[in-house]
Amino acid sequence: MKKILLGALPFLCMFFIITFIHKAKPIQHMREHAITAQHGLLTLPAHGDRDIFSIKGQWHFTPNQFYYFRDNTRPLYAPLPGRLSETSLKTEFGYASYGLRIVGLNPNKVYVLQLNHILSSCTIVINGIDRAGQGQPGVSAQTEIPGKTISMASFKPLKNGTADIVVNISNFHNRYGGTDQSIILGSADILNESFVFNLLFYNITATVLLLFSMFFIMLYLNYKKMPYILWFAFAAITISIRISVFYPHILAYIWPTMPWKFYFILRYSSMPLAALFFTIFINKIFNIQYVWIYRSIIAICLSSTAFIAIAPTLLVSRYLYMQQTLIFIAAIYDAIIIIRALFKRKKSAVWIAMVLGILAGFALYDTLVSQWVISGKLLLQEGAIISIIIAVIMSIDNYATSIHQIEQLVEEQKRIQNALRRFFPNQLLMFLQKNNITEINTGDSSELSMTVLSIDIRSFTSMSEQLEPDEVFILLNKYFALVAPIIRKYGGVIMKFLGDGFTALFSKNPDAAVACGIEIQKKLQEENIRLGNLPAIRAGIGIDTGKILLGVIGNDSRLDSVVISNTCYTAEELQAATKVYSNTIIISESIFKSLQYSENFHIRCIQESPVIDTSEQTVIYEVYDCDAPDTQDKKQKTASYIEKALKKIKEKNYATAQTYIAKSLEIFPEDPLALHYQKVIRETIYNL
């Protein structure tokens, strides 16, 4: 809710500013009086500067004549506001003069007679002088120029406080001839001030709606997962255009040379376009529709707009009621969709119900005015402003919710990515030259020079047989929780877990893999991981380096990474050999020769020929940095004897080899390696 209020704050401020300006306008301080003319005569009561008069009633009527105050031969009367069909002409089209004498005016005061938009054109003559007009009245469609604005006729009464008003009206381009709104009379200062204020107010309102529209169009361009925002923006643009072509006719003042036909199209097309955009908006936001009805409304709205654009204006205005019927059909359909959305508890249904209710109420009022059922001012634009503000708050609410959902989704994706890294680490992506796990496909592969470390728990099978299943996993997780961070510390990546062991890859020089193996062994000795009375976990480590083929195998539903390489096989064999030689870390000859700082490690050769049948490696080495200092010292002192014994074994000189082994045992009687070879040599000599 906090985000909604913050997001809506600028729009609410605009709305309150507009409302404040509207409430503060000069007309709010006027005293309006409704008065009625009888038989072409209007007598004003005593009045002050702030009094204005809303005039209705009977005017003198002279058909088929201009500039006639009245026909003295046969006096006729006609209502104004009114239309030509309500006069003795009994037709919608034609021309005539309306006359009214006003008495009771202040001869020292300047007045304004305000005549709202006439369909089609008029001139106002006061005391024999043309004061204002809309377009140019004519005696035929060819001579008439329709008007686009209201008329403000300023005048000063005669000395006797009277004024003779003549309104020349013609209509050959529209369905109606005349006006449906009261004629206003009042002080020139106050009415001119009020009109200028209204012009400014509606101009600001139309501009604000356009800004709203641009805001939501930009919002849509940056976040296309809310397509209804775009249609909402189009609806707001349509309302903004409608405001500019109705009272006080802002567009006509901004663009006075605008063709009347274009102005007419804008006025009439704003109705079907508003219905079109709002119906699409409803469909997009709720994703509920009765397909054929929805498509029919869209087609009719588009056809209606095209009809307005290309058909003669007389034909268009004659079928205005069909346009209004279309609006109500669309409103009823939209109302049904909103009701369904309310029952389904769709998000924003309450907001949209408020918007539609307001629009429908004002649209009904405007329809009654335009059909001459009641007299008044068209107010749909005011209702649209309120509706737009509500829809703005709703859209910000939806946008804030979407952003919150996106934030949650991003967090979820981060958690998923972190989880996936545990199955497919970033280093493997880097090895495969991929930026993201989503780029991984079956068949992706890469040939690399890597160091491979293989590790396995000693006697794990027999240990697990003495534990409950859950205890087995508790033990393994403690073990992996200890070992995995050390692998990462030295730049390694665990390629594959194999029960109680795993294979790790190192892209750096072999020194890192050897140092990693040493730290793992030391940590296992320090932590002494065990369960119950079972012995602490001990592990064997084998390390080799060389070319590997890293790739992805599987299908669309299941992928896995795999390493194809003799290097991995050799590392596993060396790890297995730690059981034979009773040591902790064995490295290959390739590793030994590749070490950049071999002097930093305690290394001794433990095999020089494959006659032992433990490995295909010709020469393999033991790394004993993790042994106790006393043991390290003894292994270092006996290293030369062991090496000489291995060379003699290679030469099959077993007697001499036995001598060197004996000398080694004199220094280090508990040496598992020397004891192993002593046994092997004796068995070999016996078999000979």
Image: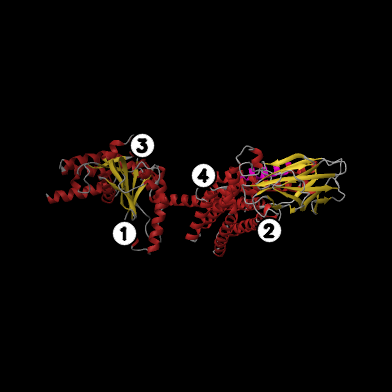
Sequence-wise, the earlier of marks 2 and 1 is 2
User: Label 2's element?
Assistant: loop
Q: What crowding class fits label 4: few (fewer than 14 Cα within 10 Å), some (14-19), or many (20 or more)?
A: few
Q: Which of the numbered marks, if any, corresponds to residue 373? A: 2
Within the magenta stretch, is there residue 201?
A: yes
User: Label 1's element?
Assistant: helix
Q: What crowding class fits label 2: few (fewer than 14 Cα within 10 Å), some (14-19), or many (20 or more)?
A: few
Q: Which of the numbered marks, if any, corresponds to residue 370? A: none
- Residue position for label 3: 600
646 with respect to 324 (left or right): left
Sequence-wise, the earlier of marks 4 and 1 is 4
**Of the two numbered discs 3 and 1 in the rendering, the one whose residue sits closer to the viewer:** 1
Cα–Cα span, label 2 and label 3: 104 Å
Residue 662 place in picture, x, y as percent: 23, 44
554 with respect to 376 (left or right): left
158 or 237, nearer to the observer: 158
User: Label 4's element?
Assistant: helix
Magenta highlight range:
196-209
Q: Main secondary structure of the magenta part?
A: helix
Q: Quadrant of residue 357?
A: bottom right
Give, as a three-letter code, the residue at label 4: Leu
Image: 20 above or below 351: above
